[in-house]
Image (cartoon, rainbow, N blue to C red):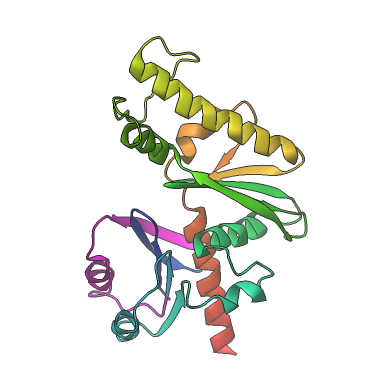
Amino acid sequence: MSNLLVEIGNTALKAVWSDRMTLGKTFRYQGEKYMDFILSLTRREKPEVMVVSSVYPISEQDVLSLREVCGSLLILDSNNKEWLITKGLPSYLSYDRAAAILACRYLFKGRGCTIVDLGTILSIDYIGPQGQYQGGNVSLGCRTRFKAVNRYSRSLPLVNMPENVPETGFSETDSIAAGVVSGIIFEMEGYLALHPENIAVFTGGDANYFAKRMKSSIFAICNLVLMGLALIADEYVRKTDK
């Protein structure tokens, strides 16, 4: 059995084939022809279940195209919020955050978690020991902050993610690097301190970058969202088999 999991984020698409909780190679795509990319993944093999999580609404035409290339299709977007309620989650959550929460409930059963997603957007979500949702916050991600500094100032340059970040900058670029990266670290340390008993889980494209810079112990799981989608696909298969 092979399922196809697709996560359409703010800046990129990630996809992976799964067999229950076993994930295969991750495919990544950036561009406007994301539907062509998804369909290309199904040319050699038809997935039994395809789960598509998207920050954008999927059009009816695209839904029809996807249904033709898989056994069963589950769309998780802003047009399909009912599923969140069945999992004890608020309807305003994006499905990438919801999938990460489901994965942590599975991986760290019986333990509270502070989930930090470090991508285009930086999100913080808390779950209690029984998996109950305890709220969360949303802010700008690291690269987005660098872009904002450049865009909304008259003369400050665009700085890329630096490997070596000084505590205090003594040049223009070092000052920006230290301000943005250290600012996010201070921010996350404050969030983690609110629930010190929780397991801290970092995910997203910048998870490893920040995990190694934190003082506390961190679980960095870059494919946490895809793991959550694998759980959703597996549950969907079991329900349809009954």
- Magenta-span inclusion, residue 43: yes
Nearer to the camera, 171 or 42: 171
Which segment is the magenta one? 22-50
- Decide which of 184, 35 is in the foreground and name it: 184
Residue 101 location in percent, x, y?
Answer: 61, 58
Q: In which quarter of the image is the N terminus?
A: bottom left
What residue is shown at x 56% (from left), y 30% (from top)?
185
Left or right placement of residue 75 versus residue 98 in this view: left
Quarter of the C terminus within the rendering: bottom right
Q: Which residue is drawn at 64% across and 32% down?
A: 189
Residue 11 seen by the camera: yes
Q: Where is residue 99 in the image (x, y as percent from the top left)?
A: 55, 62
Q: Where is residue 155 in the image (x, y as percent from the top left)?
A: 29, 25
Does residue 131 appear to the left or right of 58 in the view shown? right
Q: Residue at x 50, y 15 (%)?
A: 167
Residue 216 in magenta?
no
Q: Position of residue 200 (x, y in %)?
A: 64, 42
Left or right, 31 with reference to 55: left
The quarter of the picture where residue 42 lies is: bottom left
Tell which residue pokes out farthest to the bottom in this image: 242
